[in-house]
Image (cartoon, rainbow, N blue to C red):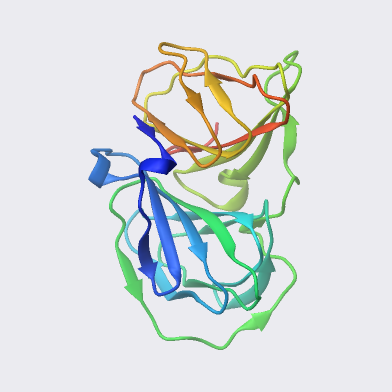
Amino acid sequence: MIIWRDQQDAVDRYPGCPRYAIAGADFGHSNLHVGDLYYLPGNGVPHHFHTGAAEETQIMLEGELECWLDGKRVTVYPGDAVTASPGTGHAFHNRTSHVARMITAFPLTPPETIHIDDTVLEDVESHPAIIRAGSRTSSYRDALDGVDKIELSGDFSGTQSTYSYFVDIQPGASMPVESFDFETAIFVVSGTARSVVGDRFLLRKDDGAVVPSGQDYGFANEGGIVTRLCVVHPFLNV
């Protein structure tokens, strides 16, 4: 399934926080709940947690946000990723004059959200569940030139059933064709991505795709700038 941004309308998740859906039950998906969430200046998502197996990965794309996580307060920036395990209180607030933006992802759909009272916070500079931008960068595959993987969430951040990462594809390069036993969500953060499988559709910035279980996929960069994809799997990295 292709999710064309120019055919979407945003829905306010909270006041001042419009969201574009990428994957979820409304689309007929069964494994993933993923969205592109904006934070207008002065707005935020209140303190809450998720139940059951609904761990949440929050991947910063633009701006900066004050992040509350398990009683700690820390600022997050583009490229950072936050893992909120089930039952862990978290919140985000835009204290700046610029729009902030993140991808939010769950390994199930729909997640249950429980709102809770604010708490006393300890200011910190880092947290084990926050992976800073670019800190886990490697070649996507050995002997594959021009394609890097930047890991965002996985066992290294405390997740139990979510693996997410950026894929940076240099102009003229291609990521390998792959398939998995679960749905895979893909979002174009920057550049363009040409499918190398099937209809060879072209995804542009802010477009997305959800690949069904067992279906091959792969993308090439035919443009002149680096393409960055955000990929989310509902299983743990192994």
Q: Residue at x 75, y 70 (%)?
A: 125
Which quadrant does the C terminus fall into?
A: top right
Q: Nearer the viewer, residue 236 or 116?
A: 116
Q: Is residue 140 above or below residue 38?
A: above
Q: Nearer the viewer, residue 207 or 107?
A: 207
Q: Residue at x 68, y 55 (%)?
A: 78
Q: Quadrant of residue 220?
A: top right
x and y, in percent, of residue 141 in the image = 68, 20
Q: Residue at x 37, y 66 (%)?
A: 13
Q: Is residue 120 above or below residue 4?
A: below
For this view, does 52 lie left or right of residue 184?
Answer: left
For this view, does 49 lie left or right of residue 99?
Answer: left
Q: Quadrant of residue 136?
A: top right
For this view, does 35 lie left or right of residue 136?
Answer: left
x and y, in percent, of residue 123 in the image = 69, 80
Q: Is residue 150 above or below residue 179?
A: below
Extreme-bottom residue of the structure: 120
Which quadrant does the N terminus fall into?
A: top left
Q: Residue at x 66, y 55 (%)?
A: 80
Q: Is residue 80 above or below residue 134?
A: below
x and y, in percent, of residue 84 in the image = 50, 61
For this view, does 80 lie left or right of residue 58?
Answer: right
